[in-house]
Amino acid sequence: MTIQKQILQAISQAFAATFDHQVDAESIALQPTRKEFEGNYTFVMFPFLKFTKMKPEDSGEKIGQYLVENCEVVSAYNVVKGFLNISVDEQSWLEVFQKLYKNKNLGQLPAKGEKVMVEFSSPNTNKPLHLGHLRNNFLGFSISEILSANGYEVIKANLVNDRGIHICKSMVAYLHFGDGETPETVGLKGDHLAGKYYVLFDKAYKKEIQALMEKGQTEEEAKKQAPLMLEAQEMLRKWEAGDEATVELWKTMNSWVYEGFDATYKKMGVSFDQYYYESDTYLLGKNIVEEGLEKGVFFKKENDSVWADLTDEGLDEKLVLRGDGTSVYITQDMGTADLKYQDHKINKSVYVVGNEQDYHFDVLFKIMKKLGRPYGEGLYHLSYGMVDLPTGKMKSREGTVVDADDLIQEMIDTAASHTKELGKIEGFTEEQATELYEMLGLGALKYFLLKVDPKKRMLFNPQESIEFQGNTGPFIQYSHARIAAILRKADQIELSYQSEAFEGLGQVEKAEKELIILLNDFEKKISQAGEEYSPSILAQYLFDLAKEYNRFYAELPIFSESDQKVRSFRVALSAQVAKTLKTGMKLLGIKVPERM
């Protein structure tokens, strides 16, 4: 039983013994004691005064006295107004540390026997990945790792938008301006080559609109009548009809893009277990519309269009099938939701998609629940905000969106110059230095994008993210490297830091105790990050742990300590912090260096 549970049970017993009132231990909570007060945990008395019939201070005194006398882990207490601050005895903290230190499965919670699919990335095959995709991919990958650590069986899925008018625009432009070039002949990644033609289409299309407007057409008419747009629409019709030449060009250009995406995903450290393609799923969902009509979940209008009435759910009426029998986005999303369940029998399905789609997913989830889907209650939209850059910091190829490959490379270059400047690569081979720059550059980028609550819009500052001080990835990475150096030295001087080497240790210092308390919270934070679908909870925890370790390191000697047991304990404590940092950063998709 954890220390917190023991204290909560004792508090429950204290209410029964002192005030003759039953308080369920499960219904009460402890908070960490604020730094300016003595104690480890705080119990707030105010909600219970109605039956203690005493002042908050007196009520706290009564409970505090009971705990000291009857709960073996409690050594002292103090009451500040209505707050009961509880101190845990030192031997209990050492026992907690012994358990943590011996735990071979640190950071892996018991299996839940449930499957969850996390769908993220969802790129379009007409352009490369950009800054917004980075937040999406890092969030999706990290939440997959966190849910896996929470005991779920996780399937990471990518639904690729590989069809539609936007794809046809790149294809039309390639036919007009491509002159048979390939990624190999021009030395360009395939996704960037497709993106180049998407931009060329846009430029040529705007010129055509201008020319038509000069001949007297309105802008709206010109947009519809521009020859390139008509050609793109015709190409989409040909593709849907299975025209051989069109499908061949589509396959060729998409294969270039996938090769480019694969290289970017590899660089990012992101992978998938299941790919779905819109070209396979865009006709799905029509059978569900029929089912919904039979069940009375949908209704038909006079023009034969089919709608879901969600007014009883606080929403409006939503179109699910056009009058001519063609799908809308939600039709295929209903079909794809069923397909995922058929493929994997999932209990939960998490969609990592920007907050501009909040309404869409609200509608989709309400419809699937009304249809009585077995996975209906497990649908979750991990909605996230936009990422902004300080203006002028970085330019993209097209000058509008920031290209993911460019940004990753810029981060690695910045990490390289910063690390050289600080002289942190002494004795490194060129290969080792390159590996370190990639680790730091990507670590800085991922951590900065993940440390903010996903729901918030955020400002990404490349320079700030790479700093070795403050709430950054490199600060945590450097803290790990520092501990790794301590462990190497301990091994060199053959200092044992196995648990038997510090058994019978008399007391622990305040800085050591603070570290044990934080280490003890690790799995609770993993659980919380999984429940709230928020890697930022874990990121903040890892920063707090690294910061607390650096304080401990500054305050207490390790190798110059004269007491052998204390020396062994401090190395063991350092080793546990390193293990926790490494395990936690892995859940964020970030590697930590062994030396710097």
Image (tube, grey):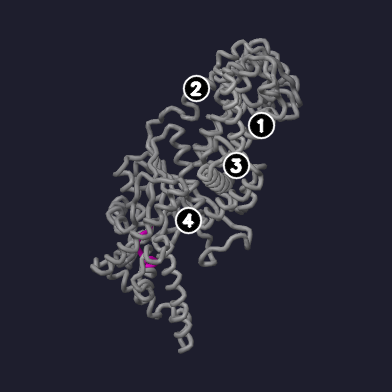
- Residue 458: where, in percent of width, then height? 60, 52
- Residue 529: where, in percent of width, then height? 53, 37
Mark 1 vs mark 3, foreground winner is 3
Between residue 54 and residue 211, name the one nearer to us: 211
In the displayed structure, would residue 371 be above or below residue 528?
below
Mark 4 vs mark 1, foreground winner is 1
Q: What element does badge 2 sit on? A: loop
* Residue with the mark numbered 3: 425
Q: Quadrant of residue 156?
A: top left
Q: What element does badge 3 sit on? A: loop
- Residue 301: where, in percent of width, then height? 34, 64
Circle 4 packing at 10 Å, graded few (<14), some (14-19), many (20+), is few
Amino acid carrying label 1: it is Glu
Span of residues in magenta: 161-167
Q: What element does badge 4 sit on? A: helix
Q: What element does badge 1 sit on? A: helix
* Residue with the mark numbered 1: 548
Mark 1 in CB contact with mark 3 (< 8 angstroms): no
Q: The C terminus appears in which quarter of the rendering?
A: top right
3D distance between C-alphas at marks 3 and 4: 45 Å
Amino acid carrying label 2: it is Asn
Q: Which mark is residue 357?
A: 4
Point out the tag, 1 or 3, that comes first from the N-terminus: 3
Mark 4 in CB contact with mark 1 (< 8 angstroms): no
Point out the tag, 4 or 1, that comes first from the N-terminus: 4
In the displayed structure, would residue 23 be above or below residue 433?
above
* Residue with the mark numbered 2: 103
In the displayed structure, would residue 498 be above or below residue 299?
above
